[in-house]
């Protein structure tokens, strides 16, 4: 674990007060800005030094063949990789005749601050060149939430104590050279020069580059314009070539004099529009942003975020690090999804190239729950993207000999591109996770249009998948065999409890929605016989249980497998998948990430309190958390079964995953699911929030470390505020009609007129569960 003392702990910002080249790649991820459409890593303005240059456009990817040593039927043939698109953030500086490069000369001071309230990344530094000239550089960067195609930089250079000649080069650079990747299989395969030049242009302060990808056939256009202010004698010129467009500004600055540049960049891409079409699109967006102006973009950003925080903020008293981390998490999750608009939300957002820019079940199971109650519009967009990809999912189901739709395990464009089918195609649970997100969204918003236009189709097609994937045995029990659950250290097993319980909900939700929308259901050819078969399958769903041990099995027979030799595994052999063959992991009891424990959270209605406690203890002893998707789920269930201190330790692990680079791969991008899991651990863990059957229920309980926890939830046009202290919970509606909720089982009507206060019942103590040796979370007193 690396602890970065250079990151400040403050409630509304993340700051860095020295430049540490050893953690530069990681800080590029944590300081990344995005709106879900454009992603700019926190690279330094001048482009170098860098860990990984990164400019991304959601959906822009290149295809490449997936090589197999041994081919097999149904293996996806084509891989997809998000590409580093044209870099619009570069502003290079020459001080007298030396490049402003922090690796040389003397960096007198350096500060970067990501302000979570304004959405701006500020940088100030003072640097003395090797020849002894000192300049001060200030820059502020934004990726606009309100103008989706726009990013902008305000850049200023000041001569400190003597006259200097400065040359500022603002550039658009395509096909940047990228550092070669490490041997970690999770790291993105980088593609060399993926952009084929189509057009370049520069005149006055304006410039533009248009490129296209070779195999995926996507056209990417980037345009920029500038406002320059400097002392008399400041001059500029511009030029362009196939992969670079440049505005060069020269000026002689006396001590205290400044040269200032506002750079507005507009991005657009399309798989169908013509070159003139895409060119005009970016020019139009640029014209719009120009008329708003830099200050207007800054003000709009603040207004957008004020509105977000007013309905989404989480306050944590007593634990400053977690307070900062949860706001950092909310900010980054918002950035990942806010303006994705019918595109996927990738596992790394747009903060890095990890996982090739793919989206997984992370989106529906981790990210969308947070957004459902804080920014629901983003959820309907994300799920409509899934609906748009139904043709590919139907085709995949057909190819696999199944009915309905089989959504991909990992993808950018909607088609499956996981080359490893045991932890890819076989992880069918992604379909139930999508269905679950659909049901949650409808239940939280009451969005009837969405229910009719999107929910019916997704629920019907996923229910069809389950009914064709499973079978009734001769006792009538319904089984889903040969699938992989969330835990990727077990694969192709029978009756994974998580999958079966989630499929059961999926089937039941399909029956309900078909009853509510018979006409729409008829469009998809659903008849009574089909929905009766879904009901039967759901009612007969088998859930494996070991009577002797009195625990639920993760999959049929799992508790009979040999337990992994934890004592014989050294700390540097984690994550296990990088040190042991999968075949060995698969045949032993060892759990990569919460699986049955996640089932107990999402299908808590199926288990009683005693079962939850026993199951939790059993799986704690087997779970190694080799995935960042685990700690937050363990936090939720640890809190539910009464291990509040352990829940807090897991919360901190999820919350500080990237701030402390706990998995040593934050350089490849942020762990968006774990960030979302921070919210989950607080709201569903210590708030005990569950939303089932249309009712919000809470079982709040704080860990010792917290003196207060407060959060807000958007629910059917209302805004509910929940404030928890050690002794009581206060519920208040900030907006909307009265709402029925449950507090530790008691029904409470919450209105705008009065705060409802309820006490917190005492907690039964249980023996602390054990984790595998060396895998306990770090204790945070
Ligand atoms: C986890 C998956 C997850 C993926 C992307 C893997 O390590 O096991 O559950 O979807 O990472 O975050």
Image (cartoon, rainbow, N blue to C red):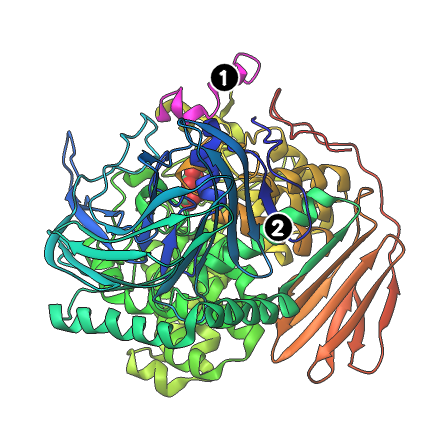
The residue carrying mark 1 is 572
Mark 1 residue's CB less than 8 Å from ligand 1: no
The residue carrying mark 2 is 13
Residue occupying the point 77% across, 44% down: 642
The percent coordinates of residue 431 (x first, y second) are 39, 57
Q: Quadrant of residue 668?
A: top left
The percent coordinates of residue 697 (x first, y second) are 71, 65
Q: Is label 2 in contact with label 1 (beta carbons under 8 Å)?
A: no
| Quadrant, the N terminus | top right
The 10 Å Cα crowd at callout 2, few under 14, some 14 to 19, many 20 or more, is: many
Task: Please check the rendered image and state whether residue 446 is part of the magenta-colored stretch, yes or no.
Answer: no
- Is 559 situated above or below 755? above
| Quadrant, the C terminus | top right
Mark 2 residue's CB less than 8 Å from ligand 1: no
Q: Nearer the viewer, residue 300 or 332?
A: 300
Q: Is residue 519 found left or right of 644 in the rendered image?
A: left
The 10 Å Cα crowd at callout 1, few under 14, some 14 to 19, many 20 or more, is: few
Q: Quadrant of ligand 1?
A: top left
- Is 241 situated above or below 219? above
Task: Please check the rendered image and state whether residue 570 is part of the magenta-colored stretch, yes or no.
Answer: yes
Secondary structure at numbered mark 2 = strand
The percent coordinates of residue 534 (x first, y second) are 41, 67
Secondary structure at numbered mark 1 = helix
Give whichever of discs 2 and 1 has the lower sequence position. Answer: 2
The percent coordinates of residue 366 (x first, y second) are 51, 53
Label 2 – label 1 distance at C-alpha: 34 Å
- Residue furthest to the top in view is 568
Q: Nearer the viewer, residue 714 or 43?
A: 43
**Residue 128 seen:** yes
First to last magenta residue range: 566-582
Residue occupying the point 70% across, 41% down: 647
């Amino acid at each position: 674990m690396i602890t970065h003392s250079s990151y400040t702990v403050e409630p509304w910002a993340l700051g860095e007060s020295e430049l540490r080249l050893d953690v530069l790649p990681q800080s590029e991820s944590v300081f990344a800005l995005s709106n879900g459409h454009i992603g700019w890593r926190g690279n330094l303005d001048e482009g170098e030094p860098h860990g990984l240059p990164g400019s991304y456009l959601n959906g822009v990817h290149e295809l490449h063949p997936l090589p197999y040593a041994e081919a097999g039927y149904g293996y996806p043939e084509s891989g997809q990789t998000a590409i580093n698109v044209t870099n619009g953030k570069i502003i290079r500086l020459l001080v007298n005749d030396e490049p402003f490069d922090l690796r040389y000369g003397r960096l007198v001071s350096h500060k970067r601050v990501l302000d979570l309230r304004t959405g701006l990344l500020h940088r100030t530094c003072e640097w003395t060149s090797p020849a002894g000239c000192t300049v001060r550089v200030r820059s502020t960067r934004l990726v606009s939430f309100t103008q989706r195609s726009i990013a902008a930089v305000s850049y200023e250079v000041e001569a400190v104590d003597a006259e200097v000649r400065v040359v500022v080069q603002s550039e658009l650079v395509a096909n940047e050279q990228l550092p070669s990747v490490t041997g970690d299989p999770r790291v993105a395969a980088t593609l060399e020069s993926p952009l084929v030049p189509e057009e370049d242009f520069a005149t006055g302060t304006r410039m533009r580059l248009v490129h296209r990808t070779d195999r995926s056939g996507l056209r990417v256009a980037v345009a920029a314009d500038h406002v320059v202010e400097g002392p008399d004698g400041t001059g500029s010129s511009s030029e362009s070539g196939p992969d670079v467009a440049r505005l060069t500004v020269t000026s002689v600055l006396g001590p205290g004099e400044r040269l200032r540049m506002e750079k507005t960049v507009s991005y657009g891409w399309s798989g169908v529009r013509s070159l003139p079409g895409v060119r005009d699109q970016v020019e139009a967006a640029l014209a719009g942003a120009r008329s708003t102006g830099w200050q207007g973009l800054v003000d709009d950003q603040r207004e957008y975020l004020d509105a977000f925080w007013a309905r989404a903020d989480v306050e944590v008293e007593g634990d400053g690090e977690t307070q900062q981390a949860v706001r950092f998490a909310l900010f980054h999750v918002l950035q990942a999804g806010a303006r994705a608009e019918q595109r996927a939300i990738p596992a790394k957002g747009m903060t890095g190239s990890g996982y090739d820019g793919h989206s997984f079940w992370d989106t529906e199971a981790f990210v969308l729950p947070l957004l459902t109650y804080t920014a629901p519009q983003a959820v309907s967009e994300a799920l409509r993207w899934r609906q748009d990809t139904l043709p590919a999912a139907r085709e995949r189901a057909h190819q696999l000999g199944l009915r309905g739709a089989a959504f991909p395990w990992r993808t950018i464009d909607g088609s499956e591109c996981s080359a490893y089918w045991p932890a890819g195609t076989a992880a069918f649970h992604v379909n139930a996770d999508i269905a679950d997100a659909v049901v949650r969204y409808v239940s939280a918003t009451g969005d009837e249009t969405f229910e009719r236009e999107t929910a019916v189709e997704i629920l019907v097609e996923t229910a069809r998948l389950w009914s064709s994937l499973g079978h009734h045995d001769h006792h009538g029990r319904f089984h889903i065999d040969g699938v992989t659950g969330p835990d990727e250290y077990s694969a192709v097993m029978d009756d994974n409890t998580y999958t079966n319980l989630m499929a059961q909900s999926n089937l039941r939700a399909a029956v309900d929605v078909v009853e509510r929308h018979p006409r729409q259901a008829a469009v998809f050819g659903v008849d009574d016989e089909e929905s009766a078969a879904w009901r039967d399958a759901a009612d007969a769903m088998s859930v494996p249980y070991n009577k002797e041990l009195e625990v639920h099995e993760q999959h049929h027979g799992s508790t009979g497998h040999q337990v992994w030799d934890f004592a014989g595994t050294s700390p540097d052999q984690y994550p296990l998948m990088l040190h042991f063959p999968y075949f060995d992991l698969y045949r032993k009891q060892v759990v990569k990430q919460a699986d049955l424990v996640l089932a107990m959270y999402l299908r808590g209605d199926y288990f009683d309190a005693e079962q939850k406690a026993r199951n939790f203890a059993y799986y704690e002893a087997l779970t190694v958390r080799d995935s960042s998707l685990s700690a937050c789920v363990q936090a939720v269930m640890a809190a539910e079964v009464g291990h509040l201190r352990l829940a807090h330790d897991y919360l901190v692990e999820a919350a500080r995953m990237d701030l402390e680079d706990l998995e040593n791969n934050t350089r490849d991008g942020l762990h968006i699911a774990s960030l979302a899991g921070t919210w989950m651990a607080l709201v569903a863990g210590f708030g005990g929030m569950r939303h089932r059957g249309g009712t919000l229920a809470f079982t709040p309980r704080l860990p010792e470390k917290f003196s207060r926890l407060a959060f807000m939830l958007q629910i059917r046009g209302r805004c509910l505020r929940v404030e928890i202290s050690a002794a009581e919970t206060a519920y208040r509606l900030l907006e909307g009609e009265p709402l029925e909720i449950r507090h530790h089982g008691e029904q409470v009507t919450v209105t705008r007129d009065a705060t409802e206060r309820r006490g917190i019942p005492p907690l039964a103590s249980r023996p602390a569960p054990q984790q595998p040796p060396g895998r306990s979370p770090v204790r945070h007193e």
